[in-house]
Each structure stands twice: as C-alpha cells, then as structure tokens.
Image (tube, helix red, strand yellow):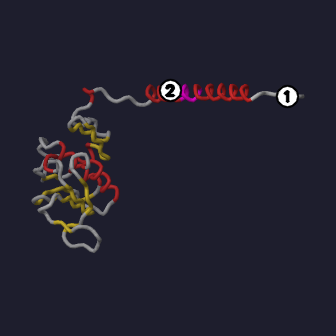
Amino acid sequence: MIRKIQNQVDIDKKNKRSKAILSIFLLLLLVLSTLGYAFFSNPLPDEEEITNTTPISNEKIKINYQGSIISLISTQEEIENISVNLNITPENYAGKVLYLDVKNEGILRELASTLSSISSRIQEACYGKCQENLPEKTCTDNLIVWKESSVRKVYQENNCIFIEGDIRSADAFLYKLFNPSQESITSTS
C-alpha cells in the first residue's frame, strides 16, 4: 500500500486534533473520578451526630474541640477505668512550646499529632538529665512524660503531666484535657 504524501499543515492539524481529543478524555476522566470519590466515599456525619465524644463504647473516641474533630485510638470502654488527675485545659498549651519525654513512637505520634493543633511547637525533650542530644526540662516547662507501667494512671505535678501505662493512658489524658468538665474518667479508689 502506498501512503498519501501529507504536507506539514495536514500533519500539524492531525496532531492538534489528537491532542485535543486526548485532553478532553483526560479532563473527563478527572472530573468523573472526583465526582465518584465524592459520592461513594464515606460521608461526614451530620453536625448533630457529633457530640463531644462518641457515646458507643466500642467505637474510637472522637472529640469535637472548637469545630475540629480529634480522633483517638482508644475506645471509651478502654479508658474509663484509668485514673486521671489533672487541672489543666487546652488553653494551658495554646501558643506555647510543649515538650514530650516519650520513648514509645506510637504514643509520641498520638500525643504530638493531637496537641500540635493547639501548641505553637512540639519538641522532644528529657525530664531531668539525659544521655541523648535533647533539651533537659523540668516541671517549670510544659512537659509531658510517659513511662511504661503495668498500672495505668495520669497525674500532674506543676507543669508536668506524667502518663503511666500504654496508649490507653495517653488517650485518657487527651480525653480529660479536651473534656475538662468531666469530673473523672474513673471512680478513683
């Protein structure tokens, strides 16, 4: 078969038309995929469905703080018997540097991701003397100290918060911090 000889003008028209068809196809694909995602992904709950916390005990805790939803890893049932003794509110950390002495990556992420929205900066530190290249802090600074323990509890000494236990203890602290009107998470014995 013999191909018809084309001049440069015809070749340019054909290329321009091909590019236009491809552009329209990609644009249509982009619009349809965005609409599909918007309609078929999980919708946000209605405003009245979001209270301060999710009341169902087997669901992860969700806290509505100043219009932002804070999601915790633990359930209400998992933290309800953890002793939490605090007299601070989020305003104590607002716009200030918050120091964390937490050697567990999961707990460090939980605390830092939640508290970074209210503090000006999150900084790892050491409570007292340490061998690491971190600032050494005392309870005159806003400091949260986590210690691994079989007993779960949270207590405050001056500007220090001591969290003992596991991720549930950290979530009990965050729950109480953002719900200061709660008398107690547990009946302290």
Label of residue 159 in the image: none
Q: Residue furthest front?
A: 8
Mark 2: few, some, or many residues within 10 Å (few <14, many ≥20)?
A: few
- Is residue 71 visible to us here? yes
Amino acid type at image mark 2: Val
Q: Residue furthest right?
A: 1
- Is residue 149 visible to us here? no
Q: Is residue 179 left or right of residue 4?
A: left
SS category of the residue bearing label 2: helix
Q: Which residues are magenta?
A: 25-29
When asked about the image quadrant of residue 180, the answer is top left
- Which residue is rendered at x = 68% and y = 25% of the image? 13
Label of residue 31 in the image: 2
SS category of the residue bearing label 1: loop
Residue 59, image x, y percentages = 32, 39
Look at the picture and state if 102 lies above or below 93.
below
Q: Is residue 85 left or right of residue 62?
A: left
Task: Locate the N terminus and report the quarter of the image it occupies.
Answer: top right
- Which residue is rendered at x = 14% and y = 61% of the image? 141
Q: Is residue 84 magenta?
A: no
Q: Main secondary structure of the magenta part?
A: helix
- Which residue is rendered at x = 24% and y = 59% of the image? 100
**What distance separates the C-alpha of mark 1 from that of mark 2?**
39 Å
Label of residue 3 in the image: 1
Residue 126, image x, y percentages = 23, 67
Look at the picture and state if 136 lies above or below 112.
below
Residue 49, image x, y percentages = 27, 28
Which of pointers 1 and 2 lies earlier in the amino acid sequence? 1
Q: Is residue 28 magenta?
A: yes
Q: How many marks?
A: 2
When asked about the image quadrant of residue 123, the answer is bottom left
